[in-house]
Structure formats: structure tokens, C-alpha cells
Image (spheres, rainbow, N blue to C red):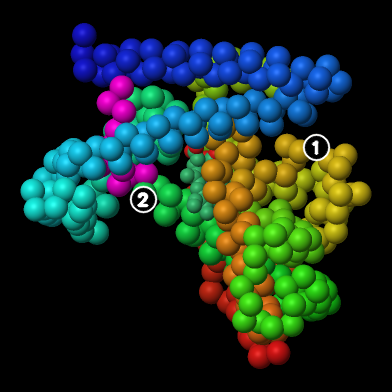
Amino acid sequence: MSGCKARVRKNRAIQKEFIESVIASLKREILEEKRIFNAEHNERNLAPFVERVLRDRMDKQIAIMETQKSTNFNNGNTKLNSNNNNNNTNNSNNNNNKQDTQYSAMDIQNSTMDSKNSTTDPHNSTLDPQNAMDQRNSMSDRELLHEMVSLLNAGFETVMFMTSLTLILLAIHPSVQEEVYNELQDVLGDSPDSAPTYDQLQRLDLLTRVIKETMRLFPAAPVIARSAPYEVQCGDYTIPAGASIAIFIYGLHRHPQLWNNPNQFDPDRFLPSQSSHRNPSGYVPFSLGPRGCIGSKYAMLQMKTTISTILRRYKILPGDKCKSLQDIRFEFGMTMRSLPGNDIRIEPR
Ligand code: HEM
């Protein structure tokens, strides 16, 4: 059997084991939550429920991996260092607990490229349950590096784009900005030097709606892709097994059948009274399901912290070239990119 076939078989066996364990968990949890399911057994609560179980299982598996990894370090196991053969200085003989692993930018680049080239298996990616179930119960240097690079890639440009777009939209909607500022004063107090707490950030309802509306109009990940593992009937369309599907989130978020005045900035769309009967699949800035964004909650906290810190000290004003929503210039890529000209000015309060 060729190496590739053997790998595919091993992967299938691991996937099967994982899926069986998920089904067992689901059965157990359904029994425990029988009441909720009898009361309202529909797709709406089933999807988040299944997702929660999947994530829960992954978290446990990852926690096990973390424990094993730290045990390995404490035992002076140099596995993490031993795979890396160029710029890596292994000082484990002198100090078993010290991970003196150094990487050059080139190592990281190569690692990412190699991982990309070798990723013929669609499940072989970030914090994947199958990786977590890997029989080695540990990660190689290369895998660990790849995970870190993926997290940085996925978490940096997206948050940067969304934060700057939110500030631009607030600059060209001064009355909304003033309302947000008033909310910040109410919830966080007058002194701009006090760091917001987690609870306070949760209470910033208007700022949350403003960020949500910005992500509707300018989703940082404008298009995502999936492949169909089996034939799927989707309304009048049959998606054949193995087909690649691109989901155009930008288009979905501005679809006139889903949104009134879709090209207008209106944070009130996300008031409970206006959003409760909306199809939840019509708004997916972080995607959905087990492969959706794992950093969504962290991203919201990060954006709210940065934006509130700026707004408490400065008034945001439009720049010379960007005075309305139509002036905002961007280009599509894996993530959205802001183009030159989207300027703002700031003025101390
Ligand atoms: C506003 C900010 C963000 C947006 C709009 C966003 C959006 C998304 C979307 C749409 C996906 C799904 C991609 C796909 O299905 O192909 C995704 C995946 C992912 N995101 Fe985010 N993201 C954001 C911030 C973050 C942050 C801060 C982190 C980590 C610190 C992060 C980590 C990830 C990872 C690791 C995945 C891949 C998950 C997987 O493949 O299972 N993201 N993100």
C-alpha cells in the first residue's frame, strides 16, 4: 500500500472513532436535555446544540493534549525540539524546563508553505479534532508552528480590518458615534483611564450592534469555501458529493430578500425586536458550525476594548476622501483589504 493510501485509511479510522465518540456524547446529552428537545425540537436549537457538543469534545481533547505536552516538557522530553533541524538551539541538556526554541521568519514561512502543500486532507487544519486524536498524542514542532501561524493569520488581519472599518463608519455617522460615546460614559464611567472589565464590555449594547452592522456590510472574510462530503439537496439544487462550494458572505449580508435597505448602515437591525425572526444563517460573519471561527468571542472583546478606548479619548472625524459609505474603498481577498483613501481624523475630546 502506498504511503498516501495508508495515511488516508489511518485518517478515516481516526475520523470514524471521533464521529462515534461524538454520537455517543450526543446521545448522552440528548437524554440529559430531553426536556428542551421535547419542547422545541427544531433545526434552530439542534444546530447550536450539536455544535456545542462538538466543541466541548474538542476542548477536552485539546486539554488532554496540553497536559501531555507539558508533562513531556517537565520530563525533559525534547520531542518538540528534536524535529527542527536548522535554526533551533536545543539547550535541554542544560535546562530541561527551558524551551529555547528559536525560529527564523524563513522557518515559519517554510512551515506554512509545507503545511499548505501537504494538506491534501481537508480535515488536516487548525485544532482539528482528527489532529487532536492523533495517536502520537503530541504535536511536532512543525505542526505547532503551523497552528500558531494559522491563529495569527486568522486573528490579526480580520480584527484589524473590522476595527478600522468600525471607526470609519462611526466617523461618517456622527450621531451614532455620539450615542456610542454616551453609552461608554454610562457603562464605563467618565475616566478614560479605567480599563473596561469583561462584564462592562458585555453591557455595551450599542457598540456591539455597531460592530455587528459593520461586519454585515464589510465582512472581514467575504467568501468561504466548503466541499460536500456527500450529495446534498439544497432547495431545488442538488450538490453532488465532492463538489466545492463557495459561500459569498458579502453577498448574503446585502441580499435584499434578507435585509431592508441592505446598503444602509443601521445598527438597530440587531435590536432583539428586529432580529429575532431573522434567519440565523443569513448573518454569518464568523461562519457557522464546527468549522466556524474559534476566535469570535475573543475578537468581539478585542474590538470592543480597542474601539471604546479610542472613543473615550478622541472624536473620530471623516477624512478628506471618505465622507460617505459609498466612498469606502476595499478589495476582496481571503480577507477584505482596505484601499488607500479610507482616511479618518481624530480630535481629543
Ligand atoms: C472580526 C474578526 C474575525 C472574523 C470576521 C473571523 C471570521 C472567520 C471566519 C468566517 C472563519 C471561517 C473560515 C472558513 O470557514 O473557511 C474563521 C475561522 C477561523 N478563525 Fe476567525 N475571524 C475573526 C477573528 C479571529 C480571531 C481573533 C482568531 C484567533 C485568535 C480567529 C481564529 C480562527 C481560526 C483558527 C479559524 C479556523 C477554524 C477552523 O478551521 O476550524 N479568528 N474566522
In the displayed structure, does residue 122 sit left or right of residue 183?
A: left
Label 1: which secondary element: loop
Residue placed most toward the observer, 347 or 227? 347
Circle 2: residue type: Val
Mark 2, residue position:
149
Q: In the rendering, at what x and y percent does residue 190 appear? A: 74, 82
Cβ of disc 2 within 8 Å of ligand 1? no
Residue 38 vs 311, above or below: the answer is: above
The magenta segment: 135-147
Q: Which of 283 and 249 is in front in this view?
A: 283
As drawn, 342 above or below 83: below
**Relative to residue 62, is residue 85 depicted above or below?**
below
Residue depicted at x 37% and y 29%: 131
Q: What residue type is labelled 1?
A: Asn
Q: Residue 279 carries which label?
A: 1
Mark 2 crowdedness (10 Å alpha carbons): few <14, some 14-19, many ≥20:
some
Q: Can residue 310 be seen in this view?
A: yes
Say whether residue 18 is left or right of residue 148.
right
- Residue 169 placement (x, y as % from top left): 71, 70
**Residue under the image location 24 percent in, 59 percent down:** 105
Q: Residue at x 66, y 90 (%)?
A: 347
State the count of labels. 2
Q: State left or right for residue 66 relative to residue 291.
A: left
Q: Which of marks 1 and 2 is nearer the N terminus?
A: 2
